[in-house]
């Protein structure tokens, strides 16, 4: 099986509502979709989670487009095999650009699963048929609005609520949500917005309002600050942006800076690394879970398959399609099921279909590469 064509689509979807985090507001999502077609007619799809702006990470749609077109796709056309691990090895010498690499690796995994006639989940070793999910709630215009929003999500059936926080939007909103819903599981995520000087304050309000998990309060490389907050804390410290590979996870584990691991395949360079990191964390008794990047149904499907693996024991940031987009790109869309879960598609491959009509409507640019 060799590569016949590769297509790089640039798509844009409007979010159902603006999503605000400590680093900015997103109203729509512009992203790349990789479509690989093999000489024997199989089609594999992968989504690149890089945003237009380098705010969550240094990668952007433009840098990913450039690296895919000039390095990674040519590498794939030269390759003798379309094995996902072989591709990973071939592009390892290129530093960074993990989101771009992951877009191809996910498409290759879709192909490899189809070639075996199994789902992506089965190919990766996943056994669960449904995965537990929660919802990530952006910063709202006011505290009452946030409390109402959380209430809506609880009514829809989400159990675990993650609140985006930042200095000035932390203790007050968390207190209000806790007062309104005394029994729910609350996580917070600051996306690196605090300086280490905020450690004692964060510890106080997080403990007081029964926050179960504090995610990435400090800068990406501030391992010592995270370790300091973790010491004796009655909540988990989750690292997201800090963990980009095996070495960063080893260092964080050794420092005691991580007691929950967020895995985003784009951030770590692909599902194969993501799986290895989660397995490594499990050996250290650190639970892992799948984070979200406002993916369309293609990226979401890949994430749901990965979340079916044993080490991912905490609820994922993978909400139903309608949490993000009025019309998702895929059929069937993801819907929230009993016990705050999403069903793992049965396959073969991704187990969802890309809607050609909706792809056309979202399409802003497209380029096809041939052998
Ligand atoms: Mg995060």
Image (spheres, grey):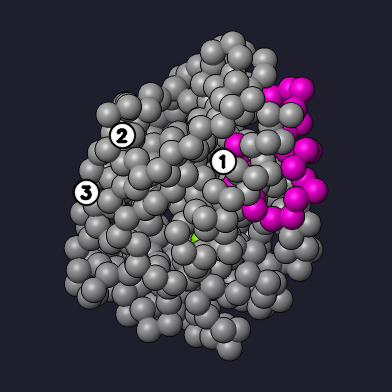
Whole-number angstrom distance, CA of label 2 to CA of label 3? 34 Å
Question: As rendered, which of 89 and 36 lies closer to the eye?
Answer: 36
Give the residue displayed 68% in from the left and 72% down from the top. Answer: 221
How many other residues sit within 10 Å of disc 3, few (<14), some (14-19) or many (≥20)?
Answer: few
> Does the rendering let one see residue 349?
no
Q: Is residue 225 visible in the rendered structure shown here?
A: yes
Residue 148 sits above or below residue 168 on the image = above
Question: In which image quadrant can residue 356 be found?
Answer: top left
* Residue 20 drawn above or below residue 285: below
Q: Where in the figure is residue 287, as x and y percent of width and height?
A: 61, 50
Q: Is 85 part of what is drawn in magenta?
A: yes
Q: Which span is picked out in magenta?
A: 79-104
Residue that badge 1 annotates:
103
* Numbered mark located on residue 155 in the image: 3
| Residue drawn where x is 71% and y is 76% of the image | 224
Q: CA distance from mark 2 to mark 1?
A: 20 Å
Q: Is mark 2 within 8 Å of ligand 1?
A: no
Q: Nearer the viewer, mark 2 or mark 1?
A: 2
Residue 158 place in picture, x, y as percent: 32, 47
């Amino acid at each position: 099986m060799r590569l016949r064509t590769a297509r790089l689509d640039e798509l844009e979807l409007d979010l159902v509502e603006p999503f605000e985090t400590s680093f900015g507001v997103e109203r729509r999502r512009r992203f790349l979709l990789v479509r690989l077609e093999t000489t024997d007619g199989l089609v594999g799809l992968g989504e690149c989670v890089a945003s237009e702006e380098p705010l969550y990470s240094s990668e952007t749609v433009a840098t990913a487009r450039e690296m895919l077109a000039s390095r990674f796709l040519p590498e794939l056309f030269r390759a003798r095999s379309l094995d996902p691990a072989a591709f990973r090895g071939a592009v390892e010498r290129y530093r960074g650009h993990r989101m771009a690499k992951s877009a191809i690796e996910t498409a290759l995994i879709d192909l490899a699963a189809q070639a075996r006639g199994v789902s992506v989940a089965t190919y990766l070793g996943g056994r669960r048929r449904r995965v537990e999910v929660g919802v990530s709630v952006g910063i709202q215009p006011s505290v009452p609005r946030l409390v109402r929003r959380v209430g809506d999500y609880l009514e829809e059936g989400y159990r675990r609520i993650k609140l985006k926080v930042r200095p000035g939007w932390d203790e007050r909103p968390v207190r209000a949500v806790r007062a309104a819903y005394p029994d729910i599981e609350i996580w917070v995520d600051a996306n690196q917005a605090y300086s280490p000087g905020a450690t004692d304050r964060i510890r106080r309000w997080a403990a007081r309002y029964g926050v179960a998990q504090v995610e990435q309060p400090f800068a990406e490389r501030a391992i010592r600050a995270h370790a300091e907050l973790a010491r004796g804390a009655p909540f988990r410290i989750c690292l997201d942006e800090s963990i980009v590979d095996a070495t960063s996870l080893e260092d964080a584990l050794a420092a005691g800076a991580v007691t929950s691991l967020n895995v985003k395949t784009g951030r770590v360079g692909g599902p194969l690394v993501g799986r290895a990191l989660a397995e490594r964390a499990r050996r250290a008794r650190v639970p892992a879970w799948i984070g979200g990047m406002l993916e369309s149904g293609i990226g979401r499907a890949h994430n749901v398959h990965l979340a079916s693996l044993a080490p991912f024991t905490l609820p994922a940031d993978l909400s139903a399609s309608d949490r993000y987009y009025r019309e998702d790109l895929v059929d069937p869309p993801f819907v929230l099921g009993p016990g705050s879960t999403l069903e793992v598609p049965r396959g073969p491959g991704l187990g969802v279909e890309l809607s050609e009509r909706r792809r056309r409507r979202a399409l802003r640019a497209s380029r096809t590469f041939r052998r």
